[in-house]
């Protein structure tokens, strides 16, 4: 049985105590810097280019991974992914493997684990040290939950700065992954703006979940333009055609939905985006592995 994402995150201890589509949701038919620079060169020349690399958030395969982590990851490599983003579940960030053994296995498959969603309130210094030791680039807070006041969000910004300093000392970066709630005003202010304005750019990056920005009725381009070089990772996740605007659970295979990723990702590449990570949360007429395969094929063919 698939675990509900929000329930999963709440029970994992990092969960803390109308809607219209933006114009963007209309279909129009090596190193951290390498992928971004490649896309920028194409945009500057007025031509389109392919993404240099792209990754998969392993939460996409949350029902398969616990059964056979090594076997599933090997299949993911076969789809053409070069990067992975992990998540911390009952088997930890490294699936009950010593972190260096996990890295060795990924090396054999030609994969790099660039980031991981984790519980930032438990043993974070150890996680940052291990992430650094295997060459990971980011530890990410995946969820804080909708807060009641603007001050509540500012308190989380302080926590993010503290975690960012721990990451900095270990030679990696800290980031926050949004859901729709940070694009819903609280006390007349946008929580996403509060978090971004109150965090130190030298310590804290952001992972834009494009699906959740669109689902909340916001425009990804507006946020990319307002905060260049702050969104350095993104979740590439499509939204179903003809979905009720109020429907939250409406993700679908890449290319089957309404988001113009060619336009969004080109703008993102021009504004500091470095990692493009497929994630899927809903499966109607497919399997998680097939959806991951479709996502890889879509990004391989995409031109921005």
Image (cartoon, grey):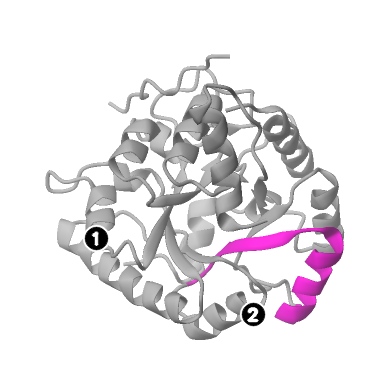
Above or below, 135 against 181 in this view is below
* Location of residue 31 (image quadrant): bottom right
Q: Is residue 124 above or below residue 218?
A: below
- Is 89 left, or right, of 294 in this rendering? left
Mark drawn on residue 234: none
Residue 234, percent from left and from top: 51, 46
Q: Nearer the viewer, residue 199 or 154?
A: 199
Name, please, the residue furthest toward the left.
188
Secondary structure at numbered mark 2 = helix
What span is in magenta?
97-119
What residue does disc 2 label? Answer: 133
Percent x, y for residue 200?
29, 65
Residue pictured at 57% horizontal, 23% vertical: 257
In the shown orientation, is residue 192 left or right of residue 115?
left
Q: Toward the viewer: 145 or 174?
A: 174
Q: How far apart are marks 1 and 2 (CA)?
A: 31 Å
Which mark is first along the chain, 2 or 1?
2
Residue 159's x, y, as percent? 31, 72
Residue that mark 1 sits on: 153
Count residues near mark 2 (Cα–Cα under 10 Å), then give few for <14, some for 14-19, many for 20+: some
- In the rendered image, the vertical position of residue 25 relative to residue 167, given as above or below: above
Mark 1 element type: helix
The extreme top residue here reads: 29
Answer whether labels 1 and 2 touch (C-beta < 8 Å). no
Which of 148 and 151 lies nearest the eye of the viewer? 151
Residue 7 lies left or right of residue 254; in this view the side is left
Q: Can residue 107 be seen in this view?
A: yes
**Is residue 98 magenta-colored?**
yes
Percent across and percent down for residue 194 are 22, 54
Question: From this viewpoint, is residue 284 visible?
Answer: no
Identify the residue at image location x=32%, y=61%. Answer: 201
């Amino acid at each position: 049985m698939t675990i509900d994402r929000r329930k999963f995150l709440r029970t994992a201890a990092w969960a803390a105590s109308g809607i219209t589509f933006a114009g963007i949701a209309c279909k129009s038919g090596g190193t951290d810097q390498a992928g971004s620079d490649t896309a920028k060169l194409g945009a500057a020349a007025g031509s389109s280019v392919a993404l240099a690399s792209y990754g998969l958030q392993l939460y996409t395969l949350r029902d398969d991974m616990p059964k056979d982590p090594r076997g599933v990851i090997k299949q993911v490599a076969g789809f053409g992914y070069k990067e992975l983003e992990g998540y911390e579940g009952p088997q930890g960030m490294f699936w009950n493997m010593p972190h260096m053994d996990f890295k060795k296995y990924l090396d054999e498959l030609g994969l790099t684990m660039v980031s991981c969603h984790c519980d930032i309130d438990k043993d974070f210094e150890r996680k940052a040290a291990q992430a650094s030791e295997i060459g990971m680039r980011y530890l990410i807070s995946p969820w804080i939950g909708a807060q009641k006041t603007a001050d509540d969000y500012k308190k989380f910004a302080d926590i993010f700065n503290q975690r960012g300093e721990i990451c900095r000392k270990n030679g990696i970066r800290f980031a926050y992954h949004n859901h729709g709630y940070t694009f819903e005003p609280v006390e007349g202010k946008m929580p996403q703006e509060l978090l971004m304005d109150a965090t130190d750019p030298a310590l804290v990056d952001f992972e834009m979940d494009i699906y959740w920005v669109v689902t909340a009725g916001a425009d990804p381009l507006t946020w990319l333009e307002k905060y260049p070089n702050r969104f350095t990772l993104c979740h590439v996740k499509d939204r179903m055609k003809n979905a009720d605007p109020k429907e939250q659970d409406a993700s679908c295979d890449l290319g089957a939905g309404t988001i113009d990723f060619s336009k969004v990702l080109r703008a993102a590449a021009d504004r500091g985006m470095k990692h493009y990570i497929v994630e899927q949360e809903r499966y109607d007429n497919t399997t998680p592995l097939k959806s991951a395969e479709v996502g890889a094929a879509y990004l391989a063919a995409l031109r921005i």
